[in-house]
Image: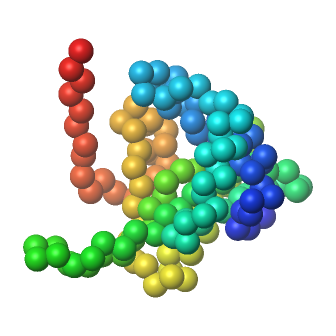
Amino acid sequence: MDIRRATPEDLDALASLRPYVHDIHARALPDSFKPSQRDAARRDAETWFGPPNVTVLLATQDDEPIGYLRLVVYDQPERELAYARRMLYVDQIALKDTVRGRGHGKRLLEAGVGLARELGIDIVELDVHHFNADARAFFVSQGFAPSRERLVRVLK
């Protein structure tokens, strides 16, 4: 597997990989997430290449896209009651079903951690939905630990 920074020329590849992460959420939370659509996924991915604090890494195998990692650097200024904080946020990780369980997700995540180190950032954060036990177990196996919990109450 090769990992490189994605470019706008990779929009079709990114759009083709989006369902592997998005549709898990759409099935589990149909009131929040619409099923993925290629054109919408491509338009969304177009916005990833403007902000300077966003990096997208593309994983390929035999020149075929198999996954991506979308990362965002957040700089929180110091406030009266909180210290300044710089962190790398893992916004999305997608991997084709056919290549899961082979260490590719681990290598993608390691590339993101490597970017954090390159940038002098010592905090990497991510969110995982409660229903996604497989993802939670994977992230914990990669050294991530819970730091806070978001509770939701739906009023209907």
Q: Residue furthest top?
A: 156
For image coordinates 24% across by 24% down, the residue present is: 154
Q: Name the side, left or right, on which 76 lies relative to 92.
A: left
- Asked if residue 3 can be seen in this view, the reply is no
Give the percent coordinates (x, y) of residue 141: 46, 54
In the picture, measured across the screen, residue 23 lies left or right of residue 82, that is right
Residue at 24%, 52% (x, y): give it. Answer: 148
Q: Indicate left or right for 98 with 106 as reference.
A: right
Please state the horizontal and vertical placement of residue 120, each as a whole percent of the image. 46, 84
Position above or below: 3 against 77: above
Quadrant holding the C terminus? top left
| Type of colouring | rainbow
Residue 98: horizontal and vertical position, in percent? Answer: 74, 38
Q: Quadrant of the N terminus?
A: bottom right
Name the side, left or right, on which 53 lies relative to 98.
left
Residue 153: where, in percent of width, then height?
Answer: 21, 28
Give the residue drawn at x 73%, y 67%: 4
Q: Quadrant of residue 77?
A: bottom left
Q: Nearer the viewer, residue 118 or 53?
A: 53
- Labels in figure, total: 0
Q: Residue at x 74, y 40 (%)?
A: 16
Taking the view exactly as shown, the residue that stands out farthest to the right is 62
Determine whether 37 is above or below 155 in the image: below
Q: Image quadrant of residue 132? A: top left
Decide which of 66, 89 is in the foreground and name it: 89
